[in-house]
């Protein structure tokens, strides 16, 4: 039997911040609060819609898949819900203090490309680490002195390059 569990919005937002690679201190600064206040807020199961949207805008993360209800409520306040809306200060709009809507259709192409490259880099580094460990095991298990010397030389060259 499937059990109904409510979403812990604070935990979901916290994981999204970590996933995007932003530091909590930087996010807190952009929100205009101190880091401890941010951590306290993220411990709450319920968060304000505006807070979720502000964090999404700061970290360039689309929360519309996780919290579609938040975006539906906020979108109802604006006339065009399919664009990222920047409140125009010259026009008085009800709830102009409401934050811009980060819609799933808006994506910064440079940020998306950076995320793809970041994932590729992490994968390559993990593969490199695995291969290096295998090479060390082979050298230690192998009686070949020449292979050990080559590996030691390779390690020394790597350290010099760093």
Image (cartoon, rainbow, N blue to C red):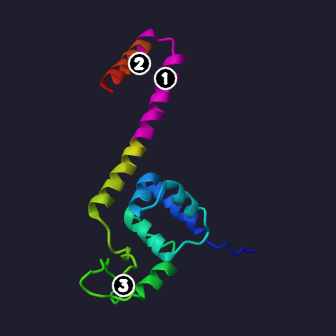
| Quadrant including the N terminus | bottom right
What percent of the width, then of the height, locates residue 120? 37, 48
The residue that mark 1 highlights is: 136
Q: Is residue 59 visible?
A: no
| Quadrant including the C terminus | top left
Q: Nearer the viewer, mark 2 or mark 3?
A: 3
Q: Earlier in the sequence, mark 1 or mark 2?
A: 1
- State the mark number for residue 149: none
What percent of the width, then of the height, locates residue 108? 29, 65
- State the mark number for residue 81: 3
Residue that sits furthest to the right in the current view: 1
- Contact between marks 3 and 1 (CB within 8 A): the answer is no
The part of the image, by quadrant, that contains residue 94 is bottom left
Looking at the rendered structure, the secondary structure element under dot 3 is loop
Q: Earlier in the sequence, mark 3 or mark 1?
A: 3
The residue range painted magenta reads: 125-147
Q: Is residue 38 left or right of residue 103?
A: right
25 over 88 or under it: above or below: above
124 over 62 or under it: above or below: above
159 over 107 or under it: above or below: above
Q: Is residue 155 magenta?
A: no
Q: Nearer the viewer, residue 63 or 94?
A: 94
Q: Nearer the viewer, residue 27 or 154?
A: 27
Question: Label 3 neighbourhood size at 10 Å, few (<14), some (14-19), many (20+)?
Answer: some
């Amino acid at each position: 039997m499937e059990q109904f569990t409510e979403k812990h919005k604070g935990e979901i937002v916290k994981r999204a911040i970590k996933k995007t690679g932003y530091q909590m201190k930087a996010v807190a600064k952009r929100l205009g609060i101190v880091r401890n206040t941010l951590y306290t807020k993220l411990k709450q199961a319920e968060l304000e819609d505006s807070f979720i949207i502000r964090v999404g805008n700061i970290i360039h993360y689309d929360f519309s898949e996780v919290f579609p209800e938040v975006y539906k409520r906020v979108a109802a306040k604006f006339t065009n819900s399919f664009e990222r809306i920047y409140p125009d200060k010259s026009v008085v709009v009800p709830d102009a203090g409401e934050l811009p809507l980060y819609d799933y259709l808006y994506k910064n192409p440079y940020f998306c490309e950076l995320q793809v490259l970041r994932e590729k880099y992490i994968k390559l580094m993990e593969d490199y680490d695995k291969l290096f460990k295998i090479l060390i095991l082979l050298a230690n298990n192998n009686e070949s002195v020449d292979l050990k010397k080559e590996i030691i030389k390779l390690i020394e060259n790597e350290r010099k390059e760093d």
